[in-house]
Image (tube, rainbow, N blue to C red):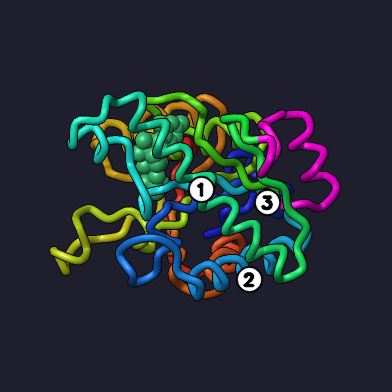
Amino acid sequence: MSTQGASQGSRSKPRRVLLKLSGEALMGEKGFGLDYLSLTRIAKDLIEVHSGGIQICVVVGAGNIFRGLAGSEIGIERPTADGMGMVATVINALAMQNMLEGLGAETRVQSAIKMDAICEPYIRRRAIRHLERGRIVIFAAGTGNPYFTTDTASALRAAEMSCDLLLKGTQVDGVYSDDPKLEPSAKRYERLSFSQVLRDNLQVMDSAAISLARENKIPILIFSIHNKGAFKKVLEGAGKFTLIDDLTE
Ligand code: UDP
C-alpha cells in the first residue's frame, strides 16, 4: 500500500509533511525528561527524509515533562497548568532544534506563545518561507491556548502549512483493535477512515485533531518512532503503520 498523496489519489511523494512527536518519544527508557540517544536518532531520521527533498514541520508534545491534566490533579488551575505544559513543549522544541543543527540541518523554532529571546513567534507566512528555503520548522507551545493538546496543534499547523500528510510518531506501530502490550491477539489496522476512528473512539489522536484533519483532507499516518529509519520507510509506503483517510468511507 502506498501512502503517497493518499488523499489526492496521486502517487507522487509528499512535498510537505508534519511530524507530531509526543514528549514520550524524546525520553527514551528514562520515564522523564530528555534522552540524548533518542533525540539524536530522531534528528537523524528527520534529516534523512529532509535530504530526500521533503519539507518537514514538527510539532512537539511535552508528556515527558509536564501535562496540564497532571497539574490540575494537584490543584493548579487548568489554564495555568496548561500554560506550564505549553512552556514545556518549548523546552523539547529547543532540544530538538539543537540536535538537528548539530547534525547540520537548518531549523527554526516558532512558538505560539511569544518568547522572543529564545525563538521566533508563530507567523504562518514566515514559517512557509522557512520551509521553502529548506529549513525544518519546529512548532512549539501547541495552539497557544489552554484546554487543547499538541495533537490538535499538529492538525492545525498541518492545515495552515498545507501539508500533504500528518504523521504521528508513537510508541506502537499503528492503531490496534486492543492494547497490543496487554492483548497479544490485538490486530493492527492497515487503514481506517476518519469516521471509524471517531465512531469507535479509537485512541489515536483526540477527536478535535481527527476532525480538523478530516475537514482539511489531510491523511494521518500512525507509526512507531522507535524504529530507526521508520520515518523514511513509511513515507515510501513500506514498514508498519496505520493510514487514516477518507477513501474508505
Ligand atoms: N497544551 C495546551 N494547549 C495546546 C497544546 C498543549 O494547553 O494547544 C498543554 C497541555 O497542558 C498538554 C501539554 O501542553 O497536556 C503537553 O502537550 P501534550 O499533552 O499534547 O503532549 P504529548 O502528550 O504529545 O507529549
Q: Answer few, some or many: residues within 10 Å of disc 3's Cα (few below 14, many 20 plus, some between 14 and 19).
A: many
Q: What's the mark number on residue 196?
A: none
Give the crowd class for mark 1: few <14, some 14-19, many >=20 residues within 10 Å: many
From the viewer's perspective, tell me whether residue 72 is left or right of residue 42: left
Mark 1 vs ligand 1: CB under 8 Å? yes
Q: Which residue is mark 3?
A: 56
Q: Percent from the top left, x then y, of residue 204?
A: 34, 45
Disc 2 under 8 Å from ligand 1? The reply is no
Label 3 sits on a secondary structure element that is strand
Tell whether position 48 is magenta: no
SS class of the residue under badge 2?
A: helix
Quadrant hosting residue 206: top left
Q: Residue at x 51, y 24 (%)?
A: 215
Residue 220 coordinates in the image, percent (x, y): 49, 44
Estimate the x, y position of residue 202 in percent, counting from the top left: 27, 42
Q: Quadrant of the C terminus?
A: top left
Instruction: Examine the rendered structure and indicate whether residue 231 appears above or below residue 90.
Output: below
Residue holding disc 2: 44
Cα–Cα gap, marks 3 and 2:
13 Å
Query: Was residue 125 drawn as part of the magenta stretch in this picture?
Result: yes
Few, some or many residues within 10 Å of mark 2 (<14, 14–19, 20+): some
Q: Earlier in the sequence, mark 2 or mark 1?
A: 2
**In the image shown, does 30 or 133 lie closer to the viewer?**
30
- Identify the amino acid type marked 3: Ile
